[in-house]
Image (cartoon, coloured by chain):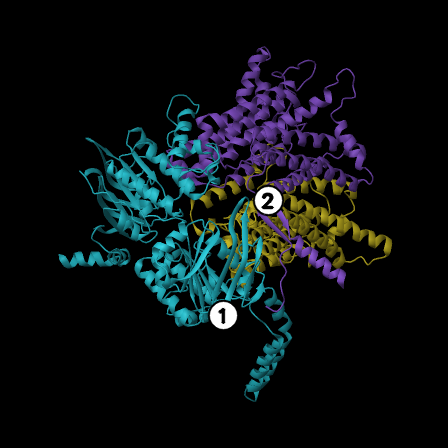
């Protein structure tokens, strides 16, 4: 048995009346990969934030290498050689990767060493005139030492051109291929993650904590990441990986700690445990892990998108000649790396992106309506039953500072004559949604921002479904939700489908898309890389379509001609 | 007025804006939007008066030597201390107590203006002109300068040179050194900076305190150099212009040298062109710098260039445990 | 790590649901603390005047003249009404996150329009009609002054904070110019020739107080019960959400900012027609900025804002009579006490929103260690 490098004893963290971490014990051994498994909101991220110094525990102690450690800030964490890659990367967008990695680095400066260096330079110099010059330089440099010391103490070191050399060395050691001079804002998600990992390694982390590292990666990128992690493990690093995906736990970890509702349930050796048992520990009861997928019956054309193009206000071509049909009674998945145009696609159809051009015909039992060049209120006033659950719940779908009722009437407040709001109907609807979806709230006049993520999403989905849509578009509808709510949402989508609604689902978890959808559109840097049958395709095939370089399809087209 | 004299006057007057915008640029780079600059300039003036009075008392009653070095040092030192204290107060409320920065800034402005008037009433409004001479010249004053070179480059007081040096050094530090990199990261993305172990609060405190002390010098210059020791009311206007100037120069103190010159030229133009000062229309011509500011605001918002992007976390209070 | 680090002594966390009684206790403590702070600073300026400050403070509410016992109280209420009126005017703009710092200029333009019309309207015109015409002109003046920044905000997202601020100085310049044309000998326009608001019950200013009281309820209703109010709060929360909800954000921004300016114009009319009877470039007297702070520290709630406005008026009048008595009548002294009052309220807000944990155990251990030595 190897020794413990990191130990938490009886750690508790409260936020107001909520106990996020409840008397948790946790041990990480040297040279192992440990998974922390738990649902969203089970306290796994909060626990690791304590280790990283983001939160300070209300109770309990942290031990590093057997000694008690007080980690009051991320700086302390670095001192104990702990590095964390957060789910939302902590990088400065406008800086290059090198500057991000160097940020906060303390440079050492010693009088003696510098003096010795100068002296050596002098004694190594040739005789004659050069020696006189060297003596002069030596004298000047020695006199300037105090100033150099002061400048260093104030961090006034100039930013040198070759400051990235040592970082590139580390990147090479672990086989990361990345251009470190690129600005973060121009990088893809997986590149940003690489920068975060290099940063932690550069700062000398022996314990590396990764929070949901796979959420935004393609299957191929995940495999590459896991390979790197295993190499690091072989090199003696200890790794903690926070996740809620069971197959990843099995693939990568040696041991797994299961958390639920802030409590530590059990720590087991991965090989000795199966998925069913882990799920049971995580959720607290046996649940069926199968996603229901009804057969498609009488598909009717609901939406015909032709040649949809969108260039944003900064001139970036976000959507390129999108063509597809959506049928009532099917779930059409949309897959792709984050930022491949999924968000823009849905928002263009919903009328939110004014610059989008092309055609988007909406079929409603005989009526055909063109949706392009119309804003949401015009679309609504034409009687088009189009519902949209956007990705950014509290930034687009809802208003965090308003109460539930006001949020429920957000899309229908302008109905009715006169300038006054009519809250009667929305109030009844809110009560209905609270009842139907089992929303946990003190009242229907609670501020929605104070609810948990799952309850917020229930209100949003409930509102959008209440308008009995013909087409329902959802973007990442289960992001950040616990398993029960996620399955509730999957079931709602399936139920809508059986009612003849055309459902579009943008998702990031390919397993879910494959299990729930009928067809999947794969997007790749703004264009449709392919439309595949979800029942027959594989994760790898989708992964390839997601990452294939942009030129390839045009080349094959050329070849075909 | 000849064109050379006009430029000389503008450079001199620009110092007020330059100190203000340099200080505020440093502050804003750390993510603190300090709308208390007008108040801080007032506090700076009051501090300078305090220092001047103390020095004159020492000279008169204790036989302290009366010379240019101490004559400048005392007011400047007191001005810096008062400005730094005001900055400390701003930080205490915004960084430690996490109050809204706009509210604290506006309260600081009210406070500073009030304090300014009251302090001058207590200290008396006269007597400072004795030190004015030390402030208005280093080499020559504008009257004794005999050629255009002396007039344009050598005819200013020490604070004018100080302002230009400080703003250029500040610009270099912000863009070219590690300290500047850290400071920018705190203003761009404090949680990222925090995650790399940078003490966000410390940097914000230090940047704001230094920035406020520099901005306060604007008040000191206005009082001791430009007015040569005559107290002037409604200083706050200049403070607001300095805040606007920060946007114009894209948060770069060294560009502030040019920006402040432009503002100052617009300011003194009505007094240099030949309009009868009794003509009411001069009041409209006097609005030129304000119109200029408005036009600059519009231009910087219409053109989506790099210049118009301030620090991303400007005005956002950072609290590590916010989820 | 060689040195064992101590647990941080102070630790701050956000408070979630604060019980109502605790809120009230903290707020009352805040106000009491604010007055004590002001008194302390006053006694710094003039030693030993700690209790005199309170005497002046409460004395400012009591009238010395027997024939008009409510005189002083109404003066305080009138000052409060003007401040509250401006902060109410700013309220819809602030709710929409349009940081209108141009109240000073909008009030001035309103007052100026009223005064100018009073100069040109024929004396034969009935007072009521003249009053209405002046009111409309004042509202229009204020509205125009905020229209410009609003249009640029809506279309180009121009920084409205500084834009509106600069418009203040433009307003002052314009008014100074006209005053120099019409009345070059004085710094103000002539007193109103028509359109003054009448006294009620022997007291002037009563109409001002009534108008602002009505405005409190009207603004509360507008924000809470009308579609306009709903739209502007959605736009303020997120322009993306507003577009998603099908709100025309441009028209909401312009409409709300113009409303804000128009109400400032109304307050300008109250100042000119109901109080000063004349206008100068200093008529707004910094109330535009104080109004901003009142709206903010009143948590954008009209009724709580009224309370804060009352305290501000109370402190202003109290400390100005203190200044007259002890500091040789300094008109700027109240600025200091008001700022101190605001700072104290900010401290109170901190304790409402955050909890400070003191790690007592460590402290006790540390103390025990010291004693042992």
Vertical position of residue A73 compared to residue C153: above or below: below
Where on the picture, by quarter, is residue A457?
A: top left
Residue B291 position within the rendered picture, expressed as x and y whole percent measured from the top left = 52, 39
Say if residue C340 shows up in the picture. Answer: yes
Locate the C terminus of chain A and report the quarter of the image it occupies. bottom left
Give the cyan chain's letter. A
Residue wearing tag 1: A3
Vertical position of residue A70 compared to residue C49: above or below: below
User: Depth check: B290 or A68 in front?
Assistant: A68
Give the yellow chain's letter. B
Q: Which mark is residue C245?
A: none
Residue B235 position within the rendered picture, expressed as x and y whole percent measured from the top left = 65, 42
Residue wearing tag 2: C354
In the image, B313: left or right of C208? left
User: Depth check: A483 or B175 in front?
Assistant: A483
User: Depth check: A53 or A526 in front?
Assistant: A53
Say if residue C248 shows up in the picture. Answer: no
* Number of other residues with Cα within 10 Å of mark 2, as a class: few under 14, some 14 to 19, many 20 or more: some
């Amino acid at each position: 048995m190897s020794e413990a490098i990191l130990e938490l004893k009886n750690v508790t963290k409260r936020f107001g009346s909520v106990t996020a971490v409840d008397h948790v014990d946790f041990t990480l051994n040297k040279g192992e990969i440990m998974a922390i498994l738990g649902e969203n909101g089970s306290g796994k991220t909060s626990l690791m934030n304590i280790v990283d110094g983001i939160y300070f525990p209300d109770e309990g102690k942290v031990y590093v290498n057997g000694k008690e450690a007080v980690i009051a800030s991320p700086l302390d964490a670095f001192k104990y050689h702990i590095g964390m890659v957060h789910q939302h990367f902590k990088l400065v967008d406008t800086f290059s990767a090198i500057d991000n990695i160097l940020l906060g680095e303390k440079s050492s400066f010693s009088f003696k060493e510098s003096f010795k260096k100068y002296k050596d330079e002098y004694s190594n110099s040739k005789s004659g005139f050069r020696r006189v010059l060297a003596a002069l330089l030596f004298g000047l440099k020695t006199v300037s030492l105090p100033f150099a010391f002061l400048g260093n103490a104030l961090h006034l070191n100039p930013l040198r051109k070759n400051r990235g050399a040592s970082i590139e060395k580390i990147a090479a050691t672990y086989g990361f291929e990345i251009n470190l001079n690129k600005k973060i804002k121009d990088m893809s998600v997986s590149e940003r993650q690489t920068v975060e990992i290099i940063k932690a390694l550069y700062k000398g982390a022996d314990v590396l904590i990764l929070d949901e590292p796979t959420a935004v990666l393609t299957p191929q990128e995940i495999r590459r990441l896991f390979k790197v992690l295993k190499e690091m493990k072989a090199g003696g690093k200890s790794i903690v990986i926070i996740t809620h995906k069971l197959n990843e736990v099995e693939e990568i970890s040696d041991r797994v700690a299961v958390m639920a509702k802030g409590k530590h349930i059990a720590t087991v050796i991965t090989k000795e445990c199966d998925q069913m048992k882990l799920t049971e520990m995580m959720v607290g009861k046996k649940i069926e892990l199968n996603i229901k997928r009804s057969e498609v019956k009488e598909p009717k054309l609901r939406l015909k998108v032709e040649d949809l193009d969108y260039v944003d206000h900064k001139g970036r071509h976000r959507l390129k000649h999108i063509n597809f049909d959506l049928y009532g009674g099917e779930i059409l998945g949309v897959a792709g790396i984050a930022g491949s145009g999924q968000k823009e696609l849905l928002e263009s159809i919903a009328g939110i992106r004014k610059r989008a051009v092309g055609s988007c015909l909406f079929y409603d039992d005989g009526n055909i309506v063109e949706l392009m060049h119309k804003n949401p209120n015009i679309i609504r006033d034409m009687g088009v039953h189009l519902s949209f659950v956007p990705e950014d719940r509290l930034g687009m779908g809802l208003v965090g500072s308003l109460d539930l009722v006001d949020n429920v009437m957000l899309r229908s407040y302008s109905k009715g004559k006169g300038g006054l709001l009519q809250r009667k109907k929305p109030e009844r609807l809110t009560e209905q949604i609270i009842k139907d979806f089992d929303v946990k709230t003190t009242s229907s006049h609670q501020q929605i921002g104070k609810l948990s993520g799952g309850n917020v999403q229930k209100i949003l989905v409930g509102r959008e479904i209440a308008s009995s849509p013909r087409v329902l578009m959802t973007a990442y509808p289960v992001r950040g939700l616990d398993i029960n709510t996620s399955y509730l949402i999957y079931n709602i989508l399936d139920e809508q489908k059986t009612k003849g609604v055309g459902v579009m689902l943008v998702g990031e978890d390919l397993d879910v898309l494959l299990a729930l959808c009928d067809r999947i559109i794969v997007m790749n840097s703004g264009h449709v890389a392919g439309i595949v049958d979800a029942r027959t395709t594989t994760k790898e095939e989708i992964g390839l379509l997601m990452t294939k370089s942009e030129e390839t399809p045009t080349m094959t087209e050329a070849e075909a001609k | 007025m000849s064109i050379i004299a006009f430029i000389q006057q503008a450079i001199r007057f620009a110092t007020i804006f330059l100190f203000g915008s340099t200080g505020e640029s440093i502050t804003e780079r750390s993510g603190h939007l300090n709308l208390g600059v007008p108040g801080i300039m007032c506090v700076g003036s009051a501090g300078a008066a305090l220092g001047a009075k103390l020095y004159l008392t020492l000279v008169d009653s204790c036989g302290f030597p009366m010379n240019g070095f101490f004559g400048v040092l005392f007011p400047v030192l007191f001005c810096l201390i008062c400005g730094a204290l005001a900055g400390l107060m701003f930080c205490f409320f915004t960084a430690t107590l996490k109050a809204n920065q706009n509210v604290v800034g506006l309260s600081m402005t009210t406070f500073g203006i009030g304090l300014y008037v009251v302090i001058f009433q207590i200290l008396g409004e006269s007597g400072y002109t004795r030190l004015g001479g030390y402030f208005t010249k280093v080499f020559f004053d504008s009257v004794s300068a005999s050629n255009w070179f002396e007039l344009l480059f050598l005819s200013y007081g020490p604070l004018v040179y100080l302002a230009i040096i400080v703003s250029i050094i500040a610009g270099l530090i912000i863009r070219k050194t590690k300290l500047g990199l850290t400071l920018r990261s705190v203003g761009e993305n404090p949680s990222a900076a925090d995650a790399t172990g940078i003490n966000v609060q410390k940097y914000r405190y230090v940047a704001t305190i230094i920035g406020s002390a520099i901005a306060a010098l604007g008040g000191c210059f206005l009082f001791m150099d430009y007015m040569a020791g005559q107290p002037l009311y409604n200083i706050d206007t200049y403070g607001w212009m300095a805040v606007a100037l920060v946007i114009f120069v894209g948060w770069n103190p060294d560009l502030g040298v040019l920006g402040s010159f432009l503002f100052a030229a617009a300011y003194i133009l009505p007094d240099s062109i030949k309009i009868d000062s009794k003509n009411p229309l001069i009041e409209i011509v006097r609005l030129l710098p304000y119109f200029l500011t408005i036009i600059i605001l519009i231009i910087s918002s219409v053109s989506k260039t790099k210049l118009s992007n301030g620090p991303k976390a400007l005005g956002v209070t950072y609290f590590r445990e916010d989820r | 790590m060689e040195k064992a680090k101590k647990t941080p002594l102070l630790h701050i966390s956000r408070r979630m649901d604060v019980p109502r009684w605790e809120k009230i206790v903290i707020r009352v403590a805040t106000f009491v603390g604010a007055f004590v702070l002001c008194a302390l600073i006053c006694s710094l300026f003039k030693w030993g005047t700690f209790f005199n400050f309170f005497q002046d403070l409460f004395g400012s509410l009591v009238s010395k003249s027997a024939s008009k016992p409510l005189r002083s109280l109404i003066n305080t209420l009138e000052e409060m009404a003007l401040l509250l009126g401006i902060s109410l005017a700013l309220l819809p703009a602030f709710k929409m996150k349009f940081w209108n710092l141009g109240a000073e200029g909008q009030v001035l333009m309103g007052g100026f329009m009223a005064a100018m019309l009073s100069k040109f309207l024929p004396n034969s015109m009935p007072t009521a009609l003249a009053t209405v015409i002046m009111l409309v002109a004042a509202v229009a003046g204020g509205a125009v002054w905020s229209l410009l920044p609003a249009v640029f905000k809506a279309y180009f997202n121009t920084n409205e904070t500084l834009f509106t601020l600069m418009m203040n100085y433009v307003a002052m310049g314009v008014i100074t110019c006209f005053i120099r044309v019409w009345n070059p000998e004085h710094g103000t326009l002539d007193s109103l020739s028509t359109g003054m608001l009448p006294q009620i019950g022997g007291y002037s200013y009563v109409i001002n107080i009534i108008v602002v009281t009505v405005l409190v309820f009207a603004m509360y209703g507008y924000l809470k019960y009308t579609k306009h109010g709903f739209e502007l709060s959605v736009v303020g929360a997120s322009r993306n959400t507003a577009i998603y909800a099908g709100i025309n954000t441009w028209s909401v921004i312009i409409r709300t900012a113009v409303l804000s300016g128009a109400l400032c114009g109304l307050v300008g009319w109250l100042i000119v027609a109901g109080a000063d009877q004349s206008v100068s470039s200093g008529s707004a007297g910094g109330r535009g900025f104080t109004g901003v702070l009142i709206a903010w520290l009143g948590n954008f709630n009209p009724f709580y804002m009224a309370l804060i406005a009352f305290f501000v008026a109370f402190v202003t009048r109290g400390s100005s009579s203190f200044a007259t008595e002890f500091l040789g009548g300094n008109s700027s002294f109240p600025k200091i006490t008001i700022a101190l009052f605001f700072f104290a309220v900010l401290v109170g807000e901190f304790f409402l929103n955050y909890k400070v944990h003191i790690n007592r155990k460590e402290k006790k251990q540390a103390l025990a260690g010291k004693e042992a030595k």
